[in-house]
Image (cartoon, helix red, strand yellow):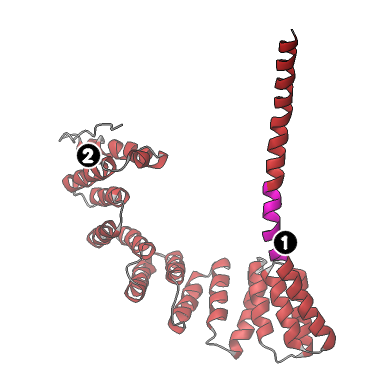
Amino acid sequence: MKEDDSRRCARRVRLVCCPLRALVAGAYFFLCLLPAAAGAHGDLYERIAHLTQKITHDPRNAALHLQRGEIHRRHRAWGAAQRDYDRAAQLDPTLTDVDLARGKLLLAARRPQAARTALDRFLRQRPDHPEALLARARTFVKLRQPAAAARDFTQVIDRVADPAPDLYLERAQAQVATGPATLADAVRGLDEGIARLGSLVTLQQQASELEIRLHRYAQALQRLDQLAAQAQRKETWLARKGDVLVRAGRTDEARQAFTDALAAIDALPPSHRHHPATRKLISELHSRLESPKFSRVPHPQQEERP
């Protein structure tokens, strides 16, 4: 009897201790995160406090107000940033960088029309400034003026020594949004990026999709072959190649591409083959091969591997 009581007591202790251990572990994890967060905010407060102290000693220094406003803007403190910009402009009306800062703030605050006004004012003084041109390009996108956005993106690309791939993608998206007449221009722009930065997957993939929209299937297939050659895993590119071949009316080659994609999946380790995304692709490939387009010739069945 005493032994049963001891067991029941031990069981109650375990039931109480398990949630307690979980609570302690959760608290410990939270406390581990605090230093990083506190450090980030601490650095922000220290920088603002440092600039505030300098402003106290030199209150009519417009550049100091602008610097503090930029820190506020980067941390999305719109009101504090705007007050610093207003004070900087009041102290030094010739400080054109205030308009650039205001433009970026207003764009981030989802006020694109006001952002354009500030950026236009800045660019009238400094028309070749890449950062301002980029901010205005993105402002034009928000204002649904894609042709103007594409022009500004082009100016940015022409003026920076090492343009990021995203600049070419953003310009292409703006050109696509302009209308069907500029799809070919978008492809040429992406090819400029490829020539300058190398055969990046993001640029080649976007170019291949635009080639398809232009019904330039041979060019799209050439790009997909290049992407497959560069890739460690080829099944996605082979599947896409099959889709393009179907559009081009090249049914036998499409069947082979789909079959090759299944074979590429079959060669993967089990952990990759059984991933949900891979299993979904397998199902899609079988559906394509079972479509009426391929009903005349039986396709090889892929055996399910363990």
> Mark 2 touching mark 1, by CB under 8 A?
no
Q: Quadrant of residue 286?
A: top left
Instruction: Give the residue at x 53% y 74%.
Output: 137
Of callouts 2 and 1, which one flags the residue occurring earlier in the amino acid sequence? 1
Give the magenta-colored segment's residue range.
29-41
Report if residue 38 lies within the magenta region.
Answer: yes
Relative depth, front residue between 196 and 138: 196
Q: Position of residue 257 (x, y in %)?
A: 22, 47
Q: Residue at horizontal 62%, vertical 85%?
A: 122
Q: Is residue 136 left or right of residue 61?
A: left
What's the mark number on residue 38? 1
Q: Is residue 32 left or right of residue 91?
A: left
Mark 2–mark 1 Cα distance, whole angstroms, equals 62 Å
Neighbor class of circle 1 (other Cα within 10 Å; few <14, some 14-19, many 20+) is few
- Secondary element at tag 1: helix
Q: Label 2: which residue? A: 293
For the N terminus, the quadrant is top right
Task: Using the image, tell me which numbered label, if any, was put on residue 89.
Answer: none
In front here: 162 or 103?
Answer: 162
